[in-house]
Amino acid sequence: MSTLLRMATAGSVDDGKSTLVGRLLHDTKSVLADQMQAVERVSKEKGLGVVDLALLTDGLRAEREQGITIDVAYRYFASANRTFILADCPGHVQYTRNTVTGASTADALVLLVDARKGVLEQTRRHLAVAALLRVPHVIVAVNKMDLVGYDADIFARVAQAVTAVASELGLGHAVAIPVSALEGDNVVTRTSRAPWYDGPSLLELLEGLPAAQDAAAYAFRLPVQLTIRPQDASRDPAFRDYRGYAGQIASGVVRRGEQVVVLPLGLATTVVGIDTADGELDEAFAPMSVTLRLADEFDIARGDMIAAVESAPVPTQDLDGMVAWLHERPARVGQRVLVKHTTRSVPATIRDIAGRLDLDKMAPQATETLALNDIGRVSLRLASPVMADNYLASRRTGSFLLIDPQSGATLAAGMVRGHQAFSDEMTIIPGQFWAWEI
């Protein structure tokens, strides 16, 4: 059975992301005949001399008319050795928020860079997003090599510049590949047009990446979505005493008979039953959706968490987080927001903005606000506690959203860094983007 890899593409406008995705789909024979016929017809109507493979992913009318990607397009394909879920993210700075969405669950990020342009501001921003989201693998596809005559020196300069920025952000594992998405060079099969490159093609590299660590390997966490008490329990003796707590396991494994703790109550109990739509189980693991029955009757509601006793998170009303600001209205100290963490939504106030990342100097910059697409650090004071892990330990329970309490609009995507207060001084240690010192 082939392993699954979740991947995302990123890059500046016109770097060829959608064409690369279309090439991957086409050359792995993952395109249906009628889809290909439609793309060929539209390409002909547009007067193009070649088939525009970007049309395989740019499905919105506005995307096709403007020739840009606006929304995140998810595609599924498989090679002989692996299956893939691919998120084709937009490159325009206006839609950076969509790139954050697409990369948030990715095991690998393919960052495209135009060989003629090299590193741009948006290249730096997407690398910073990858570092912020702790994407395990970053591949730099230096695209449009056909337009520079497959020049080895040009590739070397661009690759060195991109990997230097990646290293500053702590992405020392970034690997560069020379490709031509339009011609198909080094995308699925290796090319003879760049004899100086002896590395793998993009697909070969993706097939060889190690599988992402199983969420079941982490400590057990179940954010409660719903307390189940059947309405007809009084009439049906089988459900008269039934009380279960339903949700999707965020991480770890739970077994019948194990001791757990209910948070933020801090009360320990025992799991006496694990129910699913297919029947009762002796054990369950992430990301299964289950209903747990507990030995004791506690007042448990949506937003509470059932966790392993030996490694339970500490409920806190103070969060220190890195955020990608996604709204036109800037963030300000004292601003009231809703913090959405797993199934729990809590009113909060932005207590402090420690700084933003200067994408030119790759260093923190003092600021009193965060504007659209800024990446910075904030501290939050919550009205009631949340059970958050550090994002470095768990991407699922270490992430949160900031929401406008009036409009319901998403303001920011955040990653928990700790539960500490800020001081006025902070620095970035080279190679450690997350090491903004207190």
Image (spheres, rainbow, N blue to C red):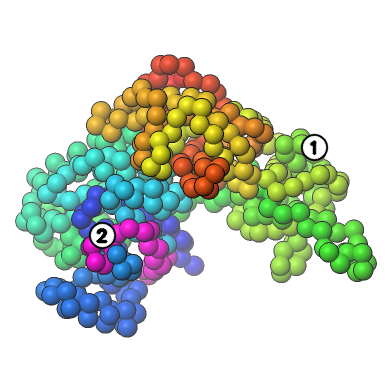
Q: Nearer the viewer, residue 336 or 388?
A: 336
Residue visible at 82% across and 50% down? 294
Q: x%, y% of residue 60?
A: 33, 67
Q: x%, y% of residue 409?
A: 49, 48
**The image quarter in which residue 238 lies:** bottom right
Q: Is residue 197 left or right of residue 401?
A: left
Find out whether residue 295 is within the magenta segment: no
Judge whether 403 appears above or below 184 on screen. Answer: above
Q: How many residues crowd mark 2 within 10 Å: few (<14), some (14–19), many (20+)?
A: many
Q: x%, y% of residue 227?
A: 76, 54
Residue range of the region highlighted in magenta in the rendering = 63-84
**The image quarter in which residue 133 lies:** top left
Q: Earlier in the sequence, mark 1 or mark 2?
A: 2
How many angstroms separate mark 1 from mark 2 (CA)?
53 Å
Residue beneath disc 2: 68
Question: Which callout, 1 or 2, points to the residue nearer the camera?
Answer: 2
Residue visible at 67% across and 34% down? 384
Q: Give, as a three-letter code, the residue at label 2.
A: Ile
Label 2: element kind: loop
Q: x%, y% of residue 11?
A: 27, 50
